Image (cartoon, rainbow, N blue to C red):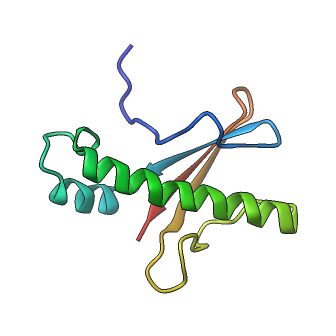
Amino acid sequence: MKVIVDTIEQDDWVIRGWTVKFLLSDKLLHQVKLISRAEHWYEDPVVADTWIVRVRICFNSIQQYYNTFGLLPQIGDRLFNEDSGLAIQDRSIDGGLKHITFTLTT
């Protein structure tokens, strides 16, 4: 089976039994593709590593927010930092698979 959209995920990105995954918005994905030297941005090790670090920081922000307030951030919340960070554009919940997917944007 072909996957139409690949999520950015790691095995340890779990909050209370729910796996947290990330997608890049079309706008953000376009920006990332422009700086990549590979045909697929995730095949460029420098670009892929940079974005995994940024998304990991976003997961840590979500996890800390949840640990403090007992709920997940909402659409529009900025995760990286207030000035130049990534914001949640959309949030999808799959109760059957226990996945929460956040779409990130600038």
The quarter of the displayed image where residue 79 is located: bottom right
Q: Can residue 71 be seen from the camera position used here?
A: no
Q: How many marks?
A: 0
Side of 51 relative to 95 (left or right) = left
- Locate residue 77 relative to residue 41 in the image: left or right: right
Residue 57 left/right relative to 63: left
Asked which quadrant contains residue 13, the reply is: top right
Q: Residue at x 48, y 75 (%)?
A: 85
Image: 81 above or below 17: below
Q: Nearer the viewer, residue 106 or 15?
A: 15
Image position of 52 with respect to 16: above or below: below
On the image, the x and y values in percent for residue 23 come to 46, 48
Residue at figure coordinates x 26%, y 51% from the top left? 46
Q: Quadrant of residue 106?
A: bottom left
Image coordinates for residue 102, horizontal then vertical, percent: 56, 52
Q: Residue at position x 39%, y 13% from top? A: 1
| Nearest to the observer: residue 75 or residue 40 | 40
Q: Position of residue 26 (x, y in %)?
A: 32, 56
